[in-house]
Amino acid sequence: MTTVEPVRARLDERILGAGTNSRFALLLLLLVTASGYMPMSVLSLLRLGGYADCVLAAGIDYSAYTLTAATRLTGQALAFLPCAARHAPPPPVWQILAGPAVVVAITAAVALLLPLWKQRRGRCIRLDRVPGGSEIAERVAELAAGRVAQVPELFLAPAATSRSAAVFGTNRRPRLLLNGGLVACRTIAPRTFDAVVLHELAHVANRDLTITYATVALWRTFIVLIVIPYLLWWSGLWALGIATGIGSTVAATFTHYLAVPVVIAVVMHLVRADVLRSRELYADLTAGRWGAPLEHVWAAPPAPPMPRTPAAPVEPGAPGAPSEPPTPAAERRRLHRLASVLLDQVRTHPRREIRRAALDDPAPLFTVSSPLMFLIGTSATLMNFHLLGHVEPRVADLSDWLGQGLAAIPAAVVAAATTAMLWRAVVRAAVLGRPAPSGVRAGLWLGLGLICGSLVNGQATGGTWLPGRVWVPALVVAVAVAVTCWTSQCARLAATSWPGRSLRRPLALCLISVWLILSAWFSWWNFYGAMYAGGFWYDPAGLRWSITNWFPGVGTARPDTTAVMAPVIAVLRYAAYRPLTPAAAVVAWVTPFALWAAGTVRRGPGRLRSPYATGSGHAVTDTVAPVTWPVPALRRALAPALAGAVIAAVGVAGIQAWLHTQHAAPGQRGGMYAFSYAIWSLWAIAAGALAAALIAAAPARFRLPAALVAAGTAAILGLGAATALISVDGCVQPLSVLNDSCAWRPAWRQLEAGNTFGLVAHSTLLLAPVIAVAATAVAALCRLAWSAIWAKARTPVPRPVAATARTRPGRRYATALPAAGVPCAALATAVVLMAGDAEAQFSTQARLVTAGAQAAFQRTAGLPVLPASQDMRRRQVIAWYRLGGRYLLDHALRVGKSVTALLDSGERHDRPEDTADLMARMRPLCQAMIDLASWEPVYFQVPDPVAQKSWHRFGEDIRKAGPACVQAVDRADVGAFRVSVIGLMAGSINAMSTSTMIELIIGDSADPVYKGEPAKPPQPRL
């Protein structure tokens, strides 16, 4: 009796796509964006003259540009942006895009010429011109029949003696180059010939020729046109700067410029090598399905015999004896393995042992490679920085949505690459009944790559060597770990419970969600996170002032409440109001909700096939695949969510009762009283979401999705409860806060001032996933600690590898369908909030920077006075004087002299009719002084602190006395007119004092700055 061994099933390597195209796209975008940014950085340095003058006028030493200097520059944006637009106009758009356009055009030409170069005369000849070539061509055609759409053009390299071949060209016109050694072995080793040819034909079938050689052409073009000139330019400047004694800030900047292309080269080679190794394994597996005997080709060669000659024993300590004991064999093997691992990352072709093992089990194609995750993070950060460099010369035209669009590009490549890898690994584990990757290690390496890229390009260092706040990069790692864990958990949900045989739709849903989350993250990091890592933060007193003046009206709150509230609200405000933040925050928990509620536990997904099934391109499905990770009922997350919503509603009611005990008078219910009402309600909602997340995250299985669904559902229900309670404020007297009568007053109307209700809604959506992630981390750490404590005291219980479906579809849908309205309400809320913010977020920086906005920034962030040497201060004052300060001071002195002369003439003729005539003649002078004083808050501050105080007093005096003078003349009020004239004279004296101080600082009456007509400063709005 013959026993037939069961066929061991395995996962088809083609499931969910290969994922190599996303990595190729990562490389292509990285090189294209770098080819645009690097020439722009050189052009910006060549155009530094006018820009440097504007920076000097702002009171900044451009050779020591730090984050503090950036704060001072931002606080004077109304003057700096028009100044830079006039004296250092940004390059036209065609110049910004010229670098990528030229590189892409030359790349296209090189890609067309590469096949011609490979098939050049002297290297290879056409096979049909070789005696006996027709027989070889017939055999290749037989092997290609039914496998590839087009038989490649055949070439022969007679001088090559190895038994190998190479395919090149494009997907539309492939070429196959056969080495002479391979052709010679066709008769003596036909299996080797067939295997090698089928492997190359598999490349054609997999359609990876065009993008492979396009990447090669782009890389070579980038090196020749961009990298080499760029390195030569900055190396020369760096050497010149070191010789002339440049400051540490400029040295750090030059070092960043030099490090970027080097890191790009390393990343490019390693990622390309990884993709090419995967490409070879996919070709092997495709050829294996066609029946290619690759096991024979990749068999390990026999080890050569080692000669052994007997040697006489040597006594220890005798001459010739080793002075140290030899390295143990285990240590040698460990070093050999380490070297092999490092070399494997550099090779473009996998080792023979890996290829042979992959034919039996394609595990390398499903592995989440830690080095690759690191390289993806580094590439994405460099690409993100290069994209920002494209718009830096035209920062005045930048809007929030344009910045969001730039952030969405690196987010897309990271999402595509990481999601594909994690999903493939999780699905393989689900099908084969093995532990799935948690995503923690992948996230750690991805986060380290993001940090490395930020340090290399200098985005997170603030113009120095290291970040000002070294702990902020830990936040980057935490976000990366959260995203990868979220992706892995969503893949586990889909692999276990998604109905149907295909996982393409849940994969697409997860991919879009990851893209939204990373887009929001990159946008926040570009505009706030990187600056905070570099050391920037607002002045605490300024933050308290901004919170106090947020909600108009009269009302007070406890001082300690304001002090605690100010920094937290600042963080929430700048994070929650990014364009895609509401959508990203909602999909973070709606996506696992949808995957969880979509189906029931079923047999393992994916296509399984026998390793011996050949000759067919279709997979053989194994209907007895193991099923792991049974998904609990959705009520595990919804029950804590309902409890959290109740806690939130009770919390809001408790806050109303507490504020009601303050007995605020009807006229004292605005200001901080109303604002604290809204913010304390937000904390009550957050408390409910936190309680729901902690309860849901207590069990070990699917902890993160459960916490997200619970926190998100509790937050949106709590927001609805808070909205209802605030809208009926006044109907229940013990809970009355803002009103004494009962009526329906929508919460968004009662808290409309300062968009306070919008802040509560935005923050609620953002806090839900943040709280869920934090609760998951706490629950996981507590469980680890508990397991460590009781590990020795408990008896291990065997856990089943497979599990069957225990939940009925009807019961699952009965739970999910009534709760489906909550995600819909959350999505609708996000859409409404994004639509309400669209007008401001589509406005450019030139439109958003107003006098009020600039004054608020100066109040909250401060306008630091930077230390400078006497010579640098003189250069700064000269720049201020030349670019517009001289015009303002000359006109102020001229009008002041006219006022003095007019008053002197009026004193000589002190008659009533002369007084009326004097007032009439003074009116245009008063108006002229008002016009001059209006420049003081919007033009650059005088770089010298003492002169600035005098100039600022001039502005304050004229802004008070000027309008009073005009009004007194219009009303014929002689008393008020005389009082206003005193203020005008005080302002004139301050202007004269400022002019004298500036002359003393310049110290040279023959300086060219005094010659010619003074230049009027540009208008403060572009």
Image (tube, grey):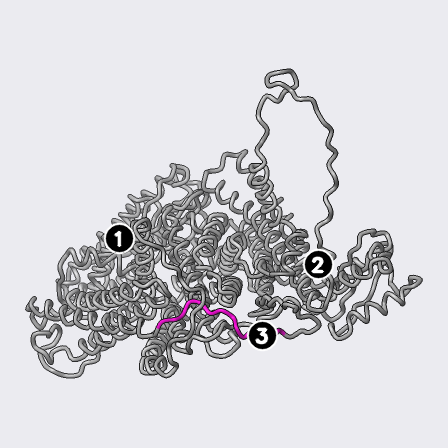
Q: Earlier in the sequence, mark 2 or mark 3?
A: 2
Q: Can residue 416 be seen in this view?
A: no
Front tag of 1 and 2: 2
Q: Earlier in the sequence, mark 1 or mark 3?
A: 3
Real-space Cα distance between discs 1 and 3?
85 Å
- Residue highlighted by disc 1: 954
Residue 21 x, y percent position in the rendering: 60, 65
- Residue highlighted by disc 2: 295
Q: Nearer the viewer, residue 968 or 691?
A: 691
Range shown magenta: 619-632
Residue 401 x, y percent position in the rendering: 43, 68
For mark 3, give the secondary structure: loop
Left or right: 37 in relation to 794: right
Q: Nearer the viewer, residue 902 or 964?
A: 964
Left or right: 900 in relation to 354: left
What secondary structure is the stretch in magenta mostly built from?
loop
Q: Disc 3 marks which amino acid?
A: Thr
- Residue highlighted by disc 3: 621
Real-space Cα distance between discs 1 and 2?
89 Å
